[in-house]
Amino acid sequence: MFAKIRSLFSSKFGAFFALIFIGIIAVAFALGDVTGSGTFGGVSAGNAAKVGNQDVSIAELRDMTDNRLRNERQRNPNLDISQFVEGGGLDTTLEQVINRYVLAVFGEEHGIGVSQAMVDAEIREIPGAKGVDGKFTSDSLRALLSRLQISEAAIRKDFTQNLYAQQIFPIATKGTVSPKSLVLPYASLVLERREGQFAIVPSSLFLPEKPPSDDELAAYYKENATQYIIPERRSISYALFNSDIVDADAKPTDADIKAYYDNNKEDFAASETRSFEQIIVSTEDAANQIISNAKAGATLQEASKETGLSVTERSAVSAKELTDSASKAVSDAIFAAGDGEYAKPARGALGWFVARVTGVSKKDARTLEQAREEITNIVLAEKKGELLAELTSEIEDALADGASLADVAKEKSLKVETSPSLIATGQNPEDPTYQPIPEMAAILPAAFQMDNDGQGQLIEVEQGTKFAILTIAKLSEAAPPPLSKVKEGITQQWAISKGSSKAKIEAEKILKAIEGGTDFKKAIADSGLKLPPSQELKASRFELTQQGREVPEALALMFAMRAESVKKLEAPNEQGWILVNLDKIIRGDANEQKNLLDQTQETFKNVFGQEHIAQFINAARAEVGVEKSEDDIESLRSSMTAITAN
C-alpha cells in the first residue's frame, strides 16, 4: 500500500515498500499544489525549508527530485532533468516533502503517537529485508540498505512520517458523502446521447502532380525538421553477472550450519502462533460493548458496526511479534483465548484491541539434523547476500577510483558486450527489426542518466540476483537525419501537406454553405468533389468511457458542440479535414440508475476527500509554521538545470 504514496511522495525507497501502507494516504500527496505559507524562526544554510522545528535539507530535496524524475522517465524516457525542473518538478516535489514534514510535526504536537515498535513492525515487512524463509533479519536489512545506499536513520524517518499520515487522514476524510441532488445532474450527464454525422475532405484528392524541386523539398524539410528529429542515441558497453558468481565461496560449512542453529534456537524450539480477526477502538468501554454485542450472536464486524471501523485479519502471528507490534497486554490476552474465542480487551499502541481467535497453530521442536536443509538454504542466502554486497562495493570503489569497464571485467572474468546506438525506448533507428535483450529494460534507464565521461557504473538488473556494469561507448545527440536518408518519405509528406492545404479550402467552402442553411449532405453533394460518403455519429458519454481506447477526434468534438451546429477539424497527420455536424442532444436521466448514482457519489466522495485533505494540510501548515529558503532553492534549481546545459 505504500506503493501509491511512494510514487506521489517521490520517496527514494521505491518498490521495496509496496503493500505496506493504506491506500487512502495516496490522496493527500497528489496535492502538490497545497502551498500554504507560514513563518517559524529562520531557515539554516543548506536547508530548503523549515517546518516547525524541523529542517528540510537541500540534499533530501535533491534526492526526492532525482527519484521522481526517474519515475517520470518510465513514462517519458526522453525527459531530461532540465525539462523536469523547468516544468515544475522541483517545486511540486518540495511541496510534497514539506507536507510530509507538516503532518509529522502537527501529529507530534497534538499527541498522535508513533512508537519505535510501530516503525520496527513496518521495517520488518520490507521484502528485501527478509531471508529466503520469509523472515526478517537484521543482516538482510543492512545488506539491502547498503545496496541502496540508504541509512537506517533515513528509512526510520520515512516510515515515521507516513505513520503519522496513516492516523490523520482517515479522520480528515470523514463526512464526504454527497446528497443525491448534487450527484444526479452529473450522473445524468453520463447518460446524455448525441446524434450527428461527419464527412472527410481527404488530402489525397489534391496531391500535386509534379514532384518538388530540390530547393523546395530542402526548404520544406528545414521548416519541419523538428517533426523528424531522432532522439538522443547511446551505444552502451556492459558486462552482466549474477549471484552465481559467489556460489563457490558462499557454500555453508557444517560449522556455519551449527552456529546458525545455536544462535537461533528459538526458531527451532516448540512454538505457537495465532490467527485472529481484530478491531481497534479508542476506549475500554467501546471494546467491552463490542464484546457484549458479539457474544449475543453478532459477528465481530456486525458487533462493531456503530464504530464505522473495519475488521482486519492477521495470520500466524507469534506472541513476540504481537508484543512488538501491539503490546504485551494484547499478546497475553490473545494467547490466553482458545480457538474461536474472544480475547479479553487489552490496550495496545493504537488503542483498545478486540480480537477473536480464528486459528491456533503449534509446531514441535526440531533438532539440528531435522532443520539442516532449511538452515543450509538460509545461511547460503545470507552468505551470498553478504558476498554480493562486498563484491558490488568493491566494483563500485574500483569504478570510482578510475578503473574502466574493461579493467573490472578482466579482473572478474566477465564478458563485455556493446549495444547498437539505441534511443531511450530501446529502438534502433538504423534497424527497425532490432530486439534488445531483456536486461536492457534496466540498463537503458540507467545509461540515459549517466554522464558521457567514460566512467563506469554498477546497476542492479534484478533485485539481489543480477547486476550490470555500464559505460557509454558512443553518444549521438538528438537531431533530424540527413535529408538524403529520408528523401522518399519527406517527398510523400510534402505532397500530403500540399494536399491538406487545398483540402482545407474546400472544407471551409462546404462549412460556409452549411452555416448558410444548406443541409449537411446536400452541401457535400453540391461541392462537386468525389468525397467518401458521410457517416452517422451516435453515442452517449457513457459509451465513450467504455471504449477502452482513444476516442476518435470527430466523436470527441461532437460532445463539445452545441446542438444544430457544424465544425471542422484537421485529420491526424495532415490526412485531410473532417466536418462534424451535431443534429441533436438527448438529455440523460439517472434517477433509476442506482449503480451509476452510487459510482458518481463515490467519485464525489474521493474529490471532496481530496479537498478536505488539502484544507487540512493548509491549516496544519499555518499552525506549525513553514518557511522556505528561496535562495538555496534557486541555487539548487540552477545547478540541476545547468546539468543539461553543460
Image (cartoon, rainbow, N blue to C red):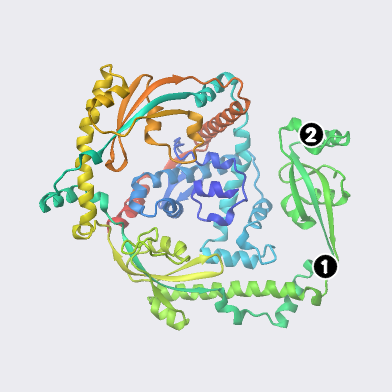
Name the mark nearer the viewer: 1 or 2.
2
The residue under the point 60% across, 33% down is 173
Residue at disc 2, secondary structure: helix
**Residue at the limit of the structure toward the top, as seen here:** 517
The residue under the point 69% across, 53% down is 117
* Label of residue 522 in the image: none
Q: Kindly identify the amino acid type of the residue bearing the numbered disc 1.
A: Ala
Residue corresponding to mark 2: 302
Q: Nearer the viewer, residue 525 or 147?
A: 525
Q: Position of residue 645 (x, y in %)?
A: 27, 56
Q: Above or below — where is 306 with respect to 90?
A: above
Q: CA distance from mark 1 to mark 2?
A: 39 Å
- For the residues bearing labels 1 and 2, Cβ distance under 8 angstroms: no
Q: Nearer the viewer, residue 407 or 519?
A: 519
Q: Position of residue 32 (x, y in %)?
A: 46, 40
Mark nearer the N terminus (1 vs 2): 1
Residue corresponding to mark 1: 269
**Direction from residue 631 to residue 506 in the image, left or right:** left
Q: Is residue 52 visible?
A: no
State the quadrant of the C terminus: bottom left
Q: Position of residue 420 (x, y in %)?
A: 35, 68
Quarter of the image where one finds residue 232: bottom left
Q: Kindly identify the amino acid type of the residue bearing the numbered disc 2.
A: Glu
Residue at disc 1, secondary structure: loop
Q: Above or below — where is 223 with respect to 587?
A: below
Q: Is residue 644 visible?
A: yes
The residue under the point 61% across, 64% down is 141
Q: Nearer the viewer, residue 241 or 139?
A: 241
What number of labels is visible? 2
Q: Above or below — where is 326 with respect to 405?
A: above
Quarter of the image where one finds residue 66: bottom left
Q: Position of residue 3 (x, y in %)?
A: 56, 50
